[in-house]
Amino acid sequence: MASDFLYNFISNHKFAVLSTVSDEHKPKSAVVGIAVTKDLKIFFDTVSTSRKYQNLLKNPSVSFVIGWDNTQTIQYEGIARIPDESELGELLEIYFNIFPDGRERYETWNDIAYFIVDPKWIRYSDFSIPQTIEEITL
């Protein structure tokens, strides 16, 4: 499966379900606004008081479910990290193009935090006929 196809699919979805794992090894899921880079990294914001923020600092392994329109979806697993200053500016511009209100959060919220997720495994599924399921390990 071509990276261009995956990029286009993900970039056509503004929201995804993010799953993290708590200290008690319990799954926690939340809908987050996402932006994707050409190399399939997912970028999102949160607040430092959220459960997901605390979970990600302790266990950076995450998964996303993206889409379901027309029975098509992507399952995505990766490792989250706080982006360094050298990459944050470019990531924010990608994000602000999708979420213009994100600029206000960046400028005014004291507890805003950002994560970038490096993909490790992606599965695209299309449950229409004929059914297609393709996995990519990165």
Image (cartoon, rainbow, N blue to C red):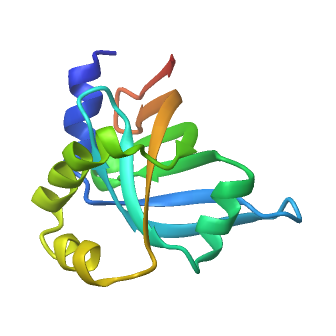
Q: Toward which corner of the image does residue 7 lie, by quadrant?
A: top left
Instruction: Find residue 109 and report its horizontal and vertical position in percent.
Output: 34, 83
Q: Residue furthest front?
A: 85
Image quadrant occupied by the N terminus? top left
Q: Which residue lies furthest to the right in this view?
A: 24
Q: Residue at x 53, y 70 (%)?
A: 30
Report whether residue 72 is seen: no
Q: Residue at x 16, y 61 (%)?
A: 96
Q: Indicate whether 1 appears above or below 122.
A: above
Q: Indicate whether 137 appears above or below 114.
A: above
Instruction: Find residue 80 and report its horizontal and vertical position in percent.
Output: 55, 45
Report whether residue 120 is seen: yes
Instruction: Find residue 112 and report its horizontal and vertical position in percent.
Output: 41, 73
Q: Which residue is drawn at 42% across and 45% down?
A: 83
Q: Indicate whether 102 appears above or below 75.
A: below
Q: Indicate whether 32 appears above or below 126.
A: below
Q: Relative to the observer, which residue lies in front, 89 or 24?
A: 89
Instruction: Find residue 20 and report its horizontal and vertical position in percent.
Output: 66, 57
Q: Relative to the observer, which residue lies in front, 111 or 1?
A: 111
Number of numbered markers: 0
Please state if 99 lies on the left or on the right of 52 as rendered: left
